[in-house]
Image (cartoon, helix red, strand yellow):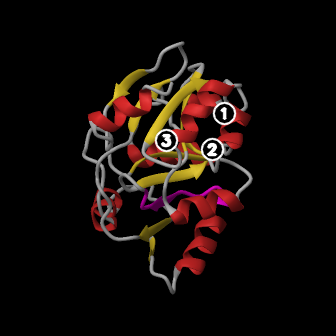
Amino acid sequence: MKTILLTDDSFASALAEAKRVLMAGGVVIAPTDTVYGILGDATNERAIRAMFAIKRRPAEKAFPIFVKDIADAKRFAYISDPKAKFLERVWPGAVTATFQHKGKLPVLLTGGRDTIGIRMPDHQLLLKLLAELSAPLAQTSANISSESPAKTAEEAIRYFEKSDIKPDLVIDGGRVPGVSSTVIDCTGVSPLILRTGIMTKQELDRVLDTF
């Protein structure tokens, strides 16, 4: 696994290398605004299969995606104007929203389900990367399934250094908060919290009042 230390000086080169790896169908581990993530081109089945193998994740479990903005999310999911207004309140940020998808992404990614989790991360590297790619990013926490998500690049490397299939690139951005995103089911008339995460209950209550 190639590792790049993310600094102000190395930002441009780290961005370029991550873009190169992802466009070639490779897999990248990178910091996010929640935990370290495993990332791949969400339209590339080879990359998605590699992510499943690296994480040792059951095939029936779907991967959520990162998008660059709400318009991008609407390319892949049915999002009404009122629900888009809700997303404006929480994105970019640590809220993953699930919607009915439009069937434009590989079935392998969605686990055969008719819904998909979508998030716009609040992280400069990821937003720059998404802006330069033509596809969203399949994403999942950087850990072996059932283990705790990595909070540092070192933790992520320890998970995968002895694996037969390894990520192609690790970007070391230092320690991240280490708490997963909040997941909200937006497929119905009213929101349903599927997982509490980095947001406090007060923040959640205030945001959900606008749904």
Q: Residue at x 43, y 33 (%)?
A: 207
- Is residue 51 at least partly visible in the picture? yes
Viewer-nearest residue: 152 or 185: 185
Query: Going by the picture, which residue comes out furthest to the top?
Result: 189
Q: Nearer the viewer, mark 3 or mark 2?
A: 3
Residue 20 forms part of the magenta stretch: no
Mark 3: which secondary structure?
helix
State the extent of the magenta-drawn residues as a range.
22-32
- Amino acid carrying label 1: it is Pro
Return the disc, 1 or 3, that comes first in the chain's sequence.
3
On screen, 46 above or below 76? below
Q: Residue at x 50, y 32 (%)?
A: 97
Return the disc, 3 or 2, that comes first in the chain's sequence.
2
Pointer 2: residues within 10 angstroms few (<14), some, or many (20+)?
many
Q: Which residue is mark 1?
A: 106
- Amino acid carrying label 2: it is Ala
Viewer-nearest residue: 109 or 123: 123
- The picture places residue 131, in percent across and down from the top left corner, at 68, 59
Measured in 3D between alpha carbons, the distance from the residue under mark 3 to the one under mark 2, in whole angstroms, is 22 Å
Mark 1: which secondary structure?
loop
- Asked whether disc 2 touches disc 1, contact meaning CB atoms under 8 Å apart, the reply is yes
- The picture places residue 198, in percent across and down from the top left corner, at 31, 44
User: 44 left or right of 163?
Assistant: right
Residue 28 forms part of the magenta stretch: yes
Viewer-nearest residue: 129 or 44: 129
Query: Going by the picture, which residue comes out furthest to the bottom?
Result: 9
User: 24 left or right of 144?
Assistant: right
On screen, 16 above or below 108? below
Q: Which residue is mark 2?
A: 42
Label drawn at residue 90:
3
- Amino acid carrying label 3: it is Val
